[in-house]
Image: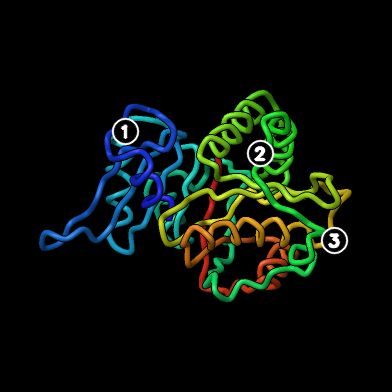
Amino acid sequence: MFLRSNVRAAGLAYEGKPLQAQYLAAFEDGRIVAVAAHCWNDMLLVQAPVHIEALARAAVAHSERRIAGISGPADQVAAARHALGLDERPTPKFGREELFALDLADLVVPAALTDGQWITRHPRADELDRMAAWRVDFALEALKRPDGPEVREDAQREVMLLHEREADWVLLDQGEVVAYSAFNASLPDIVQVGGVWVPVALRRRGYGRGVVAGSLLDARRRGVTRAVLFAEREDAKRASVGIGFIPKGDFGLLLF
């Protein structure tokens, strides 16, 4: 999803701009059989069921840039890390997260959305600073990033990029903004949900599943038919299943 969405949004040329990457592929009999992309944010994305070791090394040699993290199928992430000699490099985040998928025709919509108690919409411009602060909280809790100026600058950029793409949503309960969600990757037929955040004081009220369901209702109205997400925490998994998502595999996310 990340590879396909980023190519669709930013093309194959690389100038260091958001969503761009330097792409390498492995070929057999003239067909692409594996892909790696070293992205503008220094993440290495892999989709390489074969030749993962050679491809990971070639991608980094070609880009001549640092590696901030690796994501893709969990076994491939581990193999790429080993091939790059990074097994001993400290990492605050290396998870084998569960991958979920949903046919949007089977979306279970919370009653509070149906009866109008909850409303989802894109955040307003005057709400973006709060969304950036929530994004920082998400990075500290879910991604285990250390606090500091870099994580705050990244959060501000990420929120603005999502907002410019109209890929962000908030949930309102009786007029109060209580949750945030985004599409980290989008294609005409499928979206990838990510960055879901509910402040600690507002949890256990169903707001997480509410904001995700509301965003997917908008996507369904645009003709999107499927959604995917990955989750590590048990409460996030339960919320996903509660609106119809089904476990489909695993996903690896490693951050240095």
Q: Secondary structure at mark 1?
A: helix
Q: Name the foreground residue: 81 vs 98.
A: 98
Q: Earlier in the sequence, mark 1 or mark 3?
A: 1
Q: Secondary structure at mark 3?
A: loop
- How busy is the neighbourhood of tag 3: few (under 14 within 10 Å), some, or many (20 plus)? few
Say which residue label 1 marks.
Answer: 63
At label 2, the amino acid type is Arg
**Residue visible at 42% across and 33% down?**
40
Q: x, y (%) of residue 133?
A: 73, 33
**Residue visible at 70% across and 52% down?**
120
Residue farthest to the left, as pictured? 29
Say which residue label 3 marks.
Answer: 204
- How busy is the neighbourhood of tag 2: few (under 14 within 10 Å), some, or many (20 plus)? some
- Residue 69 located left or right of residue 111: left
Q: What is the distance, in whole Å, between disc 1 and disc 2 at their CAs?
A: 24 Å
Q: x, y (%) of residue 153?
A: 62, 26
Q: Name the foreground residue: 34 vs 89.
A: 34
Say which residue label 2 marks.
Answer: 145
Q: What is the distance, in whole Å, between disc 1 and disc 3 at their CAs?
A: 44 Å
**Residue visible at 31% across and 33% down?**
63
- Residue 240 located left or right of residue 174: left
At label 3, the amino acid type is Arg
Q: What is the distance, in whole Å, between disc 3 and disc 2 at their CAs?
A: 24 Å
